[in-house]
Image: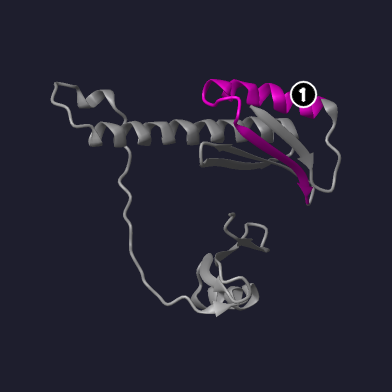
């Protein structure tokens, strides 16, 4: 796994880099060598924050943890990341099991059951607008995100509210 570590408005010490690389090396059993992991270290209001993002085969695993020390935040972030990986693996195995066209005896108790997703479908017209207008619309309807067509590029984009209170913009990559 290729690991990129950077600090946001801070420099990351070599001891922390070594700890991050050691912790993330345990995930090599789940991923191939072409997997990319990005680790961001930052301090906000005296709290240490570690954000880990792993891109593997079109799937993104992300975990962000905050604590009084970077090492504790790293431990918790790795635990959260491992939970996501195992949950995704269980979900994929369940989908394969359900879609497989075979006849045989198997014990249902061997598999961990996942909660079914309840999907509520809504339709609405995409109006071309700027990201600022989309943020206003999102706040008006009281949602955490808002999909829209960018008036400049014509792309379908998404604005969302971040935990820190700022806003994010998702633009499709071509």
Q: Is residue 50 magenta?
A: no
Q: Is residue 120 above or below residue 75?
A: below
Q: Residues within 10 Å of mark 1 (few under 14, many from 20)?
A: few
Coloration mode: one colour
Q: Is residue 15 above or below residue 8?
A: above
Residue 19 is inside the magenta segment: yes
Report whether residue 69 is seen: no
Q: Quadrant of residue 171?
A: bottom right
Q: Nearer the viewer, residue 136 or 157?
A: 157
Q: Quadrant of the C terminus?
A: bottom right
> Quick check: 170 left or right of 39?
left
Q: Which residues are magenta?
A: 15-44
Residue under the point 60% across and 29% down? 34
Residue 103 in the image, given as x and y percentages of width and height: 13, 25
Query: Residue at horizontal 69%, vertical 21%?
Result: 22
Quadrant in which residue 32 is drawn: top right
Q: Quadrant of the N terminus?
A: top right
Residue 71: x percent and y percent? 72, 30
Residue at image coords 17%, 27%: 102
The total of numbered circles placed on residues is: 1
Q: Position of residue 58 (x, y in %)?
A: 51, 41
9 and 123: which one is in front? 123
Q: What kind of element bears circle 1?
A: helix
The percent position of residue 33, horizontal first and vertical second, equals 60, 25
Q: Which residue is mark 1?
A: 18
Q: Residue at x 43, y 36 (%)?
A: 88
Q: Is residue 150 visible?
A: yes
């Amino acid at each position: 796994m290729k690991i990129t570590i950077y600090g946001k408005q801070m420099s990351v010490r070599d001891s922390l880099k070594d700890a991050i690389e050691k912790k993330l090396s345990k995930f090599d059993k789940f991923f191939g060598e072409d997997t990319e992991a990005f680790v961001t270290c930052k301090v906000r209001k005296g709290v240490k924050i570690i954000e880990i993002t792993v891109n593997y085969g079109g799937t993104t695993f992300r975990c962000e943890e905050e604590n009084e020390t970077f090492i504790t935040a790293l431990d918790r972030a790795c635990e959260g990341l491992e939970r996501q990986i195992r949950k995704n693996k269980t979900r994929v195995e369940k989908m394969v099991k359900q879609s497989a066209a075979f006849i045989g005896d198997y014990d249902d108790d061997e598999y961990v059951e996942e909660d079914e997703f309840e999907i509520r479908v809504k339709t609405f017209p995409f109006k071309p607008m700027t990201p600022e207008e989309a943020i206003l619309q999102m706040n008006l309807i009281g949602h955490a995100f808002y999909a829209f067509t960018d008036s400049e590029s014509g792309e379908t984009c998404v604005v969302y509210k971040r935990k820190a209170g700022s806003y994010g913009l998702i633009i499709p990559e071509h």
